Amino acid sequence: MPKVLVAYYSKTGNTKQVAEAIAEGAKSVQGVNVEIKNVADINAKEAVEADGFAFGSPSYFSVMSGPLLTLLTELYFVREKMAGKPMAIFATGVGGQVKAMENIESILKAFTPKLILPGLAIGNKISETDKQQAKQLGEKLAKSLA
Ligand SMILES: Cc1cc2nc3c(=O)[nH]c(=O)nc-3n(C[C@H](O)[C@H](O)[C@H](O)COP(=O)(O)O)c2cc1C
């Protein structure tokens, strides 16, 4: 069964909430396995076996957080296994989340994905509307490989 990996970093829980909603949305699609993990618990060589990816981070100084950059750097070394797979990006912040997403996207492009879905930029107070949007993103990602 194809697998979606939702990989996130979160220190104070905002990005984690968005990741959980994305995973919930992805799980609503039949025939797709969904795994959600903090980047600190991810082994790049295992992670690369997933068929679709969502990467999320808080905006730190308008770029992604260090732990996500560390994972993406490790994935770069096995990027041929990332090629041709669908990907999604999400970020939280107090204004710098769009820049952080652009930062993540510039790296994902080096993995030659099948597609990068329109990113989800969210503030630091996660609303029900944000969660709904996140669920929709997860569903779209899962449907792209179902
Ligand atoms: C060290 C640090 C730097 C930050 N820099 C930015 C920033 O440049 N732009 C921004 O929009 N938010 C910034 N923030 C706010 C966080 O991105 C925001 O609170 C985020 O939702 C935290 O995510 P988390 O709860 O998943 O850890 C920063 C927070 C910290 C702790």
Image (tube, grey):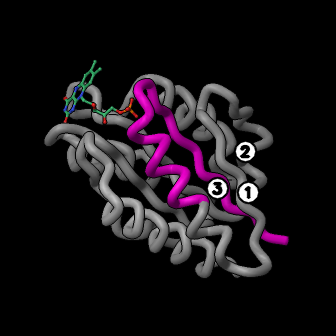
Disc 1 versus disc 2: distance between alpha carbons?
Answer: 6 Å
Task: Give residue 98's position: percent from left, percent from top.
Answer: 22, 49
**Residue annotated with mark 3:** 82
Contact flag, marks 3 and 2 (Cβ < 8 Å): no
* Amino acid type, label 1: Ala
Indicate whether residue 18 is drawn in magenta: yes
Closer to the camera: disc 3 or disc 2?
A: 2
Task: Give residue 123's position: percent from left, percent from top.
Answer: 23, 46
Q: Which mark is residue 47?
A: 2
Residue 24 vs 55, above or below: the answer is: below
Indicate whether residue 60 is drawn in magenta: no
Q: Residue at x 17, y 38 (%)?
A: 94
**Residue annotated with mark 1:** 50
Q: Secondary structure at mark 2?
A: helix
**Nearer the observer, 16 or 143:** 16
Within the displayed image, which quadrant is ligand 1 positioned in? Answer: top left
* Amino acid type, label 3: Met
| Residue neighbourhood size for the residue with mark 1, other residues' Cα within 10 Å, grouped as few (<14), some (14–19), many (≥20) | some
Left or right: 114 in relation to 1: left
| Residue neighbourhood size for the residue with mark 2, other residues' Cα within 10 Å, grouped as few (<14), some (14–19), many (≥20) | many
Residue 120 vs 55, above or below: the answer is: below
Task: Give residue 59's position: percent from left, percent from top.
Answer: 29, 35
Magenta part of the protein: which range? 1-23
The mark that comes first in sequence, 3 or 2, is 2
**Residue 95 figure quarter:** top left
The mark that comes first in sequence, 1 or 3, is 1
